Every structure is written in C-alpha cells, then in structure tokens.
C-alpha cells in the first residue's frame, strides 16, 4: 500500500466522527450531513465507529462469541453493503501468547513485547449477509485500512494480523484463505 493512495485525516477528527473507507481505499470520506446534497457512496465500505455505537453493539451482541467488552488498542467498523449495514469488523491488541502464532511470526520470550506491538488481532468479524466473495472482500478492505489508522491513532506500524476461528457451524477460515491469509494451525484449542 503506497502512501500516495492515502488521505491524511487529523486523528482527533477520526475519533470523534465516523469516517467512511471505500474498497479501493482511495479516500477517507466523511459522511454527508442530512442537509447536504446526496453523496454517492460505493457499494461496499467500512464506517469507522466507537464500540458503544448502538448499531455496532446490536450486531456485536449477535456474534457467536459472547460480548465481554474489549481491552487495549481497538478499532471498530460497521460494514455497509448496497445501502445497508450488513456486519461489523474490529481490530484489537493481539493475544499475549499463542504457540502457533508465535512460531509463525518468530515471536520469542525475549522479543514478545516488542513483536506483539506490531501484530493486530481481528477481534470480531460478523457478516449478516451471505454473498459469494463478500467476506473476503471485507477482510481485504480491513487489511488495507487498519495499518493506516493504527499508525495514525497509536503511532505503531503493523507487521501482521491474527484471528481465531472456532470451527463450528461451517466456519473453516475459507474467507481468510481467499483473502490471502495463512492458516498458522489446523486446530485451534
């Protein structure tokens, strides 16, 4: 991702107002106010939000992993598709110790604190609309925008991502594989 494709946005503005990120990540588009002229938005985009946003919370509470809040660094997004909110996706601080992940990234006891500072966990991903390739498109979009916002808000460069998948109800990580992610372990315990 070249920096020439990014639009600089003041950090305080990002935290206080929703920002829309399109699939090509060519721009960060502030939503139009109700009294503004109609704005054409892409079919698929992410809206940066707080985890206390009622629209986010409503979908989060339907995720198969119970909502116990979040700790550490966090970014939260609403997923918009064809004019409606169809899901949520979040980024957060990584899990402290995970054997398979640590091996994959070369994390040791000696470098753990520094190494984990640049790993971001996809803490929640819930998509309530089923359509071919939609999940992998969202994952790819999230992967593009998180390093930029992570650097702008937390001052840290991102070196990699992690997520956990509970292999139930047909969840097997195929959307992550389609988005180019590597499975660090066959069985998650």
Image (cartoon, rainbow, N blue to C red):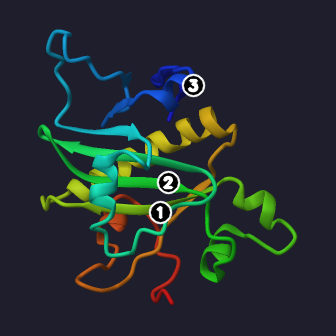
Q: Are marks 1 and 2 in contact (CB under 8 Å)?
A: yes
Disc 1 crowd rating (10 Å Cα; few below 14, some 14-19, many 20+) is many
Q: Secondary structure at mark 3?
A: helix
Residue drawn 46% across the image and 89% down it: 187
Q: Which quadrant of the figure has residue 179?
A: bottom left
Residue drawn 54% across the image and 26% down it: 3
Q: Secondary structure at mark 2?
A: strand
Structural distance between the alpha carbons of marks 1 and 3: 23 Å
Residue 123: which disc? 1
Q: Which quadrant of the figure has residue 125?
A: bottom left
Q: Earlier in the sequence, mark 1 or mark 3?
A: 3
Q: Secondary structure at mark 1?
A: strand
Structural distance between the alpha carbons of marks 1 and 2: 6 Å
* Towards the viewer: 26 or 123: 123
Disc 2 crowd rating (10 Å Cα; few below 14, some 14-19, many 20+) is many
Residue drawn 33% across the image and 61% down it: 60
Q: Is residue 60 above or below residue 148?
A: below
Residue 112: which disc? none
Disc 3 crowd rating (10 Å Cα; few below 14, some 14-19, many 20+) is few
Residue 170, how many percent across, how many down?
23, 82
Q: Earlier in the sequence, mark 2 or mark 3?
A: 3
Residue 20, how many percent across, how many down?
34, 31
Q: Nearer the viewer, mark 1 or mark 3?
A: 3
Q: Nearer the viewer, mark 2 or mark 3?
A: 3
Residue 15, how many percent across, how many down?
51, 32
Q: Earlier in the sequence, mark 1 or mark 2?
A: 2
Left or right, residue 91 beside residue 104: left
- What residue does disc 3 label? 12
Structural distance between the alpha carbons of marks 2 and 3: 19 Å
- What residue does disc 2 label? 91
Residue drawn 32% across the image and 65% down it: 61
């Amino acid at each position: 991702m070249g920096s020439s494709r990014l639009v600089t946005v003041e950090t305080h503005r990002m935290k206080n107002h929703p920002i829309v990120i399109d699939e090509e990540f060519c721009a960060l588009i502030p939503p139009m106010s109700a009294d503004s002229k109609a704005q054409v938005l892409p079919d698929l985009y992410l809206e940066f939000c707080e985890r206390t946003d009622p629209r986010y919370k409503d979908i989060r509470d339907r995720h198969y992993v119970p909502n116990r809040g979040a700790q550490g660094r966090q970014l939260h997004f609403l997923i918009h598709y064809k004019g409606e909110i169809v899901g949520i996706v979040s980024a957060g601080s990584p899990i402290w110790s995970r054997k398979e992940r640590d091996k994959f990234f070369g994390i040791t006891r000696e470098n753990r604190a520094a190494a984990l500072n640049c790993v971001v966990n996809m803490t929640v991903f819930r998509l309530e609309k089923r359509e071919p390739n939609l999940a992998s498109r969202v994952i790819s979009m999230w992967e593009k925008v998180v390093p930029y916002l992570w650097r702008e808000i937390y001052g840290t460069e991102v070196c990699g991502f992690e997520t956990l998948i509970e292999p139930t109800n047909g969840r097997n990580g195929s959307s992550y594989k389609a988005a180019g992610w590597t499975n660090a372990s066959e069985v998650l315990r």
